[in-house]
Image (cartoon, rainbow, N blue to C red):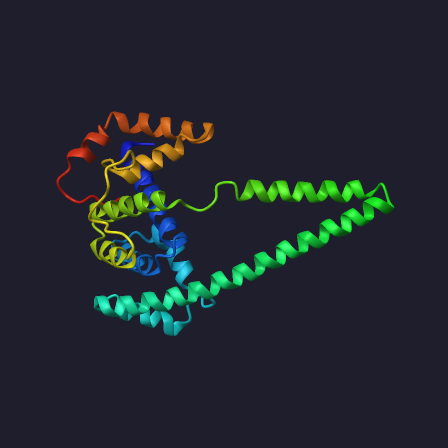
Amino acid sequence: MNPSRSMNVERSSLCNCVVNFLLEEGYTLAAFELLHELLEDGRDDQAIRLREYFSDHALFPSDQIARFNSIRAADPQTLLEEKQILEEKLAVTEYELRLVQEDVTRLKSDLEKISEARAEESPDASIANGLKNLLEKKESNFFSLGPLKDAERRDLNCAVKEYLLFAGYRLTAMTFIEEVTDQNLDVWPKNSACVNDALRRYYYQYLSSTTEAAEVLINRLCICRDGNFFEQMKYSRTPVRL
């Protein structure tokens, strides 16, 4: 793999990180704007997931997509109104999620009662208990990471905004700033996460979190070393499409 191809792979990886973050954190308008900027930039490969996401008519009926298109040229007040609509839908979704969680809790309670009753009647009840414990263990492992902490989300918001501006996606950055209403993205409090080229550093830290990912990281660093990639990125005065 030559340095140019390695650089393209890294740019795609960083862009995919931003796409995943916008979708998973519910920054729908910013994601929609990024989709159009990627397509206009000729980066169809990075736009695949966004295009599939917004093509899902179950999530986005045609009339809602039409509203999104009008929002791209809308004023801040219109953006705020659309944000309130999305928040209302989110509240309904969260309510439905709570109902499901309550059902799960009730079913677990019923299962425990049944298991206790069977334990008194048959020694085979230990098998049912073992399956139940295994299920709970798998569920615990699945949710062990938990949601993002507030401080982590604030740092990621700032890092994503920095990335969008540096990559030249200014319309997406403006839309993203409008969507993040509970934080001033122009002020990043000084902490260990506030570093230059933050998103790239976060990405490499993630890569080094496992043995397999660390091997990928070392390989990429070796490839980019001769081309002095990081120095070029550090001192570049023109926006670089990441």
Position of 202 compared to 184: left or right? Answer: right
Does the image show residue 45?
Answer: no
Position of 174 relative to 89 (above/below): above
Residue 198 in percent (x, y) is at 27, 38
Position of 228 relative to 138 (above/below): above
Q: How many marks?
A: 0
Which residue is at a point 62% across and 59% down the rendered structure image?
103
Position of 166 compared to 107: left or right? Answer: left
Q: Nearer the viewer, residue 52 or 121?
A: 121
Residue 5 in percent (x, y) is at 31, 37
Which residue is at a point 67% across and 52% down the rendered structure image?
108
Residue 29 in percent (x, y) is at 32, 61
> Based on the displayed image, in which of its 4 quarters is residue 228 positioned?
top left
Q: Nearer the viewer, residue 53 or 150?
A: 150
Residue 136 in percent (x, y) is at 63, 44
| Quadrant of the snapshot with the C terminus | top left
| Quadrant of the snapshot with the N terminus | top left
Which residue is at a point 37% across and 71% down the rendered structure image?
64
> Based on the displayed image, in which of its 4 quarters is residue 207 positioned?
top left
